Amino acid sequence: MSRWVQGVVGLLAAAALAVGVVGWAQYVRQNASSSASNASIVDEKATARVQSAVAQGLEQVLSYTYSDPTTTQAAADRVLTGKAREEYDTLFATLKKEAPGQKLVLTARVTAAGVKQLSDDTASLLVFVDQSARRKGDEQAAVSAAQIAVEARRTGSTWTITGLDPL
């Protein structure tokens, strides 16, 4: 092999190595910055606070007693904002209209809540909820499970739910 060909091959190998090193450095920097900006990875206390707030809030707004709809309405006033509140109000209007005739009682229980992304004032969670429904004449409650993608926003020390997306 001539010296010229050896030089070209050496130059190409060095260029490929340089491109690989630059690409690897960018990959590491991107992953480090996205991990560092996700507090759910590094801040256990903040993660636990948002999990607890969202779980309690969902249990309150997804539980309902036909004889006392104001409790659920008050919880929605405290916990829901934005699109989540708009969608909830539509559902609540139907529920409030039909539930007394059925003597409907809904009880929600969050079985798990995982924080996907957490910053100082926003969070994305995946929440698993069991909801039992008991109507007049039912011998047993009907139980259903749901997975909900939740978006939350913190104002001061209070987390509110801004988005609910059943999966």
Image (cartoon, rainbow, N blue to C red):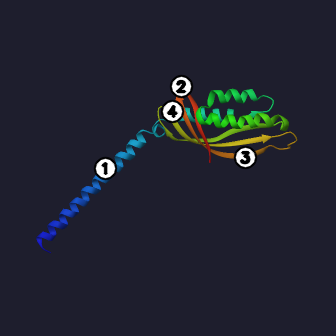
Q: Which mark is residue 157?
A: 2
* Mark 2 or mark 1, earlier in chain: 1
**13 versus 25 height, above or below:** below
Residue that label 1 marks: 25
Q: CA distance from mark 2 to mark 1?
A: 38 Å
- Residue at the image position 12 percent from the left and 69 percent from the top: 4
Q: CA distance from mark 4 to mark 1?
A: 30 Å
**142 versus 89 height, above or below:** below
- Residue at the image position 67 percent from the left and 46 percent from the top: 146
Q: CA distance from mark 2 to mark 3?
A: 32 Å
- Residue lying at the far left of the rendered structure: 3
- Please identify the quarter of the rendering in which residue 84 is found: top right
Q: Secondary structure at mark 4?
A: helix
Q: CA distance from mark 1 to mark 3?
A: 47 Å
- The answer to whether residue 52 is visible is no
User: Amino acid under label 4?
Assistant: Ala
Other-residue count near label 2 (Cα within 10 Å), few / some / many at <14 / 14–19 / ≥20 = few
User: Amino acid under label 1?
Assistant: Ala
In contact (CB < 8 Å): disc 2 and disc 1: no
Q: CA distance from mark 2 to mark 4?
A: 11 Å
Q: Which mark is residue 144?
A: 3
* Mark 2 or mark 3, earlier in chain: 3
Q: Secondary structure at mark 3?
A: strand
Residue that label 4 marks: 46
Other-residue count near label 3 (Cα within 10 Å), few / some / many at <14 / 14–19 / ≥20 = few
- The answer to whether residue 5 is visible is yes
Q: CA distance from mark 4 to mark 3?
A: 30 Å
- Residue at the image position 25 percent from the left and 58 percent from the top: 17
